[in-house]
């Protein structure tokens, strides 16, 4: 199922790329930007990833702590079961042990529900935070792309990912990276040609 989905997505991406190229043929000034590379080099990406990893680790540590608490309760229950099977114990002692086991089983069930609820809520919260971070970052990146598009008088700027080929001089990736990193005073050494020329029909 997963392979089929990936295949469909791949075909969809190819179809869209073909449509974009067709549209590009109708435009005077067409450029490309590798958005994945831009995001990797965006000055907010690494700190955000490190912070997200820290939050994930905190959630994992808390989850493991709860699991250990559950294991402790389970071990206590196992110890009581061994005691109740001891023929040397009186019926009164066995009845008391049964009550203790019942109490522990209730605690174990409650802890299990607590663990499942915690994991579900944390997973949802972390995913919401991740999506919010991506949305915020790409809002800034897209603003940088639009600003550069105006400077270049671009008719169309395509995402380089998915395109079969584009001339290096039409690649604005490094210029976008420098533009979006200006607030942090970051610079990026350009690997593309400095003078980008508009594409011809």
Image (spheres, rainbow, N blue to C red):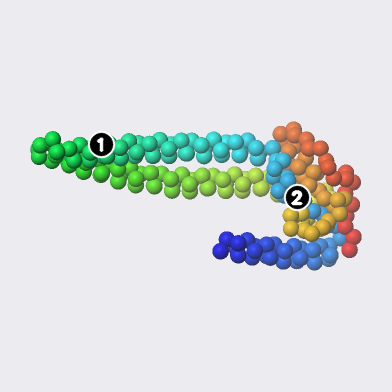
Quadrant of image for the N terminus: bottom right
List x then y, in percent, for residue 44: 66, 38
Q: Which mark is residue 134?
A: none
Question: Can you tell which of label 1 and label 2 is closer to the viewer?
Answer: 1
Q: Nearer the viewer, residue 61 or 128?
A: 61
The residue shown at (73%, 45%) is: 38
* 10 Å crowding of disc 2: few (<14), some (14-19), many (20+): some
Q: Is residue 164 above or below residue 72?
A: below
Per the image, the residue denoted by label 2 is 34
List x then y, in percent, for residue 47: 63, 35
Horizontal placement of 143 versus 155: left or right? Answer: left
Q: Is residue 116 above or below residue 27?
A: above
List x then y, in percent, for residue 94: 14, 39
* 10 Å crowding of disc 1: few (<14), some (14-19), many (20+): few
Horizontal placement of 96 versus 167: left or right? Answer: left
Q: CA distance from mark 1 to mark 2?
A: 61 Å
**Secondary structure found at label 2:** loop
Per the image, the residue denoted by label 1 is 79
């Amino acid at each position: 199922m997963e392979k089929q989905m990936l295949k469909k997505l791949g075909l969809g991406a190819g179809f869209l790329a073909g449509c974009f190229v067709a549209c590009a043929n109708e435009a005077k000034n067409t450029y490309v930007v590798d958005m994945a590379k831009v995001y990797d080099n965006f000055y907010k990406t690494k700190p955000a990833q490190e912070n997200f990893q820290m939050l994930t680790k905190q959630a994992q540590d808390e989850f493991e702590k709860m699991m250990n608490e559950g294991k402790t309760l389970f071990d206590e229950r196992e110890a009581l079961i061994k005691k109740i099977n001891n023929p040397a114990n009186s019926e009164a002692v066995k009845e008391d042990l049964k009550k203790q086991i019942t109490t522990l089983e209730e605690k174990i069930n409650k802890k299990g529900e607590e663990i499942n609820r915690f994991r579900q809520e944390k997973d949802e919260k972390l995913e919401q935070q991740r999506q919010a971070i991506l949305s915020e970052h790409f809002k800034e990146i897209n603003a940088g792309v639009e600003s550069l598009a105006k400077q270049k008088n671009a008719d169309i700027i395509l995402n380089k990912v998915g395109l079969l080929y584009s001339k290096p001089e039409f690649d604005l990736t490094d210029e976008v990276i420098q533009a979006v990193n200006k607030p942090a005073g970051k610079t990026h050494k350009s690997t593309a040609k400095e003078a980008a020329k508009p594409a011809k029909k």
